[in-house]
Image (spheres, helix red, strand yellow):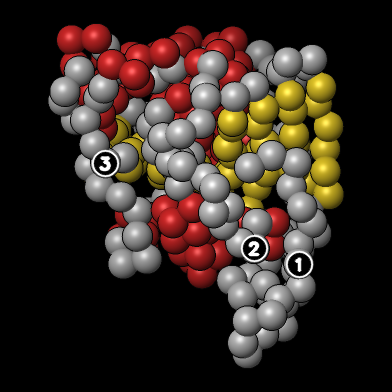
C-alpha cells in the first residue's frame, strides 16, 4: 500500500475505516508496516491471510517444508494441487492473488538463533506460530533483543492460548514457559481446523493493534480458552525480573524463579 491511503485503498478498506476510532492514519500505519509470520500452518496462515485482508504493507513468511495431505484440514493458504510443493511459495501465491497490493517475502527454512536477526530485519511485529519450542524460543530472544513486539499463540486440540511479548513492558515467552515440555511432539498433537483458524484471526487482531495503536493489546496477560465448552479467561503473566532472556536481574547460572504453570501447552 502507499504511504497515504488512495481512493482505491479507501474503497478496499472502507468497512474497517468505519470502525469507531480507526482512522486513515491507522490504515496508513498498517499499510507501511512489515510483519514476520513464523509458521504458516493453521495459525500463522490464517493470521497472514487476515493481515493481508486488512492491508498490511509487507509480510515475511518463514516455514520450512512441503505441503502434505494431512495439512489440508486447517491450512487455508494451501490448495490440494500443491501437495508435495513448498508451503511458503504456495502461501505467497495465494496471498498475492488475494491482495496484490501486499508485498510477500518467503523463506523456506526454520528459525534459529543464527538467522532470526536477518529474518526480522525491517519488521515491526512478529507472529510466533511454529509447532516447536526451539523456533519459538529463538524468535522470542531475537524480538526481545531487537525490541520488536511478538504475538505468541499455540493450540492443542480444542484449547489454545494467546499473549503478547512487549519487550521492556511485559513478560516474554521464557517468563511464562521457562522450560520445555519433554512430552511434546511437533507433529503429535490434535488439531480441529476451526480452532486454529479462530486463534489465527485473534493473532492478526493483536498484530493490527500493535502496529497501528488502535485498541488495547494484551499486556502481561494470557488469553486462555477451551472451545469444548466455550470457556474463555485471562491469566496474569507477570514479568520474571530474573528471566534469562528479558529480566533486569538475570541469574549468573541456572536455578531460576519458576513462572506460573500455564493452562495449556
What residue is shown with label 2? 178
Q: Which mark is residue 258?
A: 1
Is there any visible trace of residue 213 in the rendered image? no
Mark 3 crowdedness (10 Å alpha carbons): few <14, some 14-19, many ≥20: some
- Residue 57: give x, y in percent of width and height: 39, 34
Toward the front, the furthest residue is 183
Residue 74 visible to an observer of this rendering: yes
Residue drawn at the location 32% of the way across and 42% of the way down = 62
For residue 233, which quarter of the picture? top right
Please tell me how crowded label 2 is: few (under 14), some (14-19), or many (20+) other residues with Cα within 10 Å: many
Considering depth in this image, is 55 or 111 the residue closer to the camera? 111
Q: Is residue 228 left or right of residue 91?
A: right
Q: Which mark is residue 241?
A: none
Name the image quarter holding the C terminus: top right
Q: Quadrant of the N terminus?
A: top left
The kind of secondary structure element at disc 1 is loop
Mark 3 element type: loop
Q: Position of residue 4 (x, y in %)?
A: 45, 32
Q: Quadrant of residue 34?
A: top left
Q: Are marks 1 and 2 in contact (CB under 8 Å)?
A: yes
Marks 1/3 in contact by CB < 8 Å: the verdict is no
Crowd rating for badge 1 (residues with CA inside 10 Å; few <14, some 14–19, many 20+): some
- Distance of label 3 from label 2 (alpha carbons): 26 Å
Label 2: which secondary element: loop
| Identity of the residue drawn at 51% across and 69% down | 145
- Asked if residue 97 is positioned above or below residue 108 in the image, the reply reads above
- As displayed, is residue 186 above or below residue 196? below
Can you identify the residue that label 3 sits on? 64
Callout 3–callout 2 Cβ contact below 8 Å:
no
Amino acid at each position: 500500500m502507499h504511504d497515504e491511503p488512495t481512493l482505491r485503498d479507501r474503497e478496499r478498506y472502507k468497512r474497517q475505516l468505519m470502525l469507531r476510532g480507526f482512522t486513515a492514519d491507522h490504515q496508513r500505519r498498517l499499510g507501511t508496516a512489515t510483519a514476520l509470520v513464523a509458521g504458516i500452518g493453521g495459525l500463522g496462515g490464517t493470521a497472514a491471510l487476515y493481515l493481508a485482508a486488512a492491508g498490511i504493507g509487507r509480510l515475511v513468511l518463514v516455514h520450512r517444508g512441503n505441503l502434505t495431505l494431512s495439512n489440508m484440514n486447517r491450512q487455508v493458504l494451501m490448495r490440494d494441487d500443491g501437495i508435495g510443493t513448498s508451503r511458503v511459495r504456495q502461501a505467497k501465491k495465494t496471498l498475492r492473488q488475494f491482495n496484490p497490493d501486499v508485498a510477500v517475502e518467503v523463506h523456506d527454512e526454520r528459525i534459529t538463533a543464527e538467522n532470526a536477526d536477518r529474518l526480522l530485519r525491517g519488521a515491526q511485529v512478529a507472529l510466533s506460530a511454529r509447532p516447536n519450542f526451539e523456533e519459538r524460543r529463538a524468535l522470542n530472544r531475537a524480538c526481545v533483543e531487537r525490541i520488536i513486539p511478538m504475538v505468541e499463540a499455540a493450540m492443542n486440540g480444542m484449547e489454545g492460548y494467546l499473549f503478547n511479548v512487549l519487550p521492556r513492558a511485559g513478560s516474554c515467552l521464557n517468563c511464562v514457559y521457562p522450560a520445555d515440555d519433554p512430552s511434546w511432539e511437533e507433529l503429535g498433537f490434535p488439531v480441529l481446523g476451526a480452532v486454529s483458524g479462530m486463534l489465527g484471526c485473534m493473532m492478526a487482531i493483536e498484530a493490527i493493534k500493535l502496529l497501528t495503536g488502535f485498541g488495547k493489546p494484551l499486556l502481561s496477560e494470557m488469553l486462555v480458552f477451551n472451545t469444548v465448552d466455550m470457556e474463555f479467561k485471562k491469566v496474569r503473566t507477570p514479568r520474571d525480573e530474573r528471566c534469562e532472556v528479558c529480566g533486569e536481574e538475570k541469574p549468573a547460572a541456572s536455578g531460576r524463579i519458576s513462572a506460573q504453570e500455564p493452562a495449556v501447552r
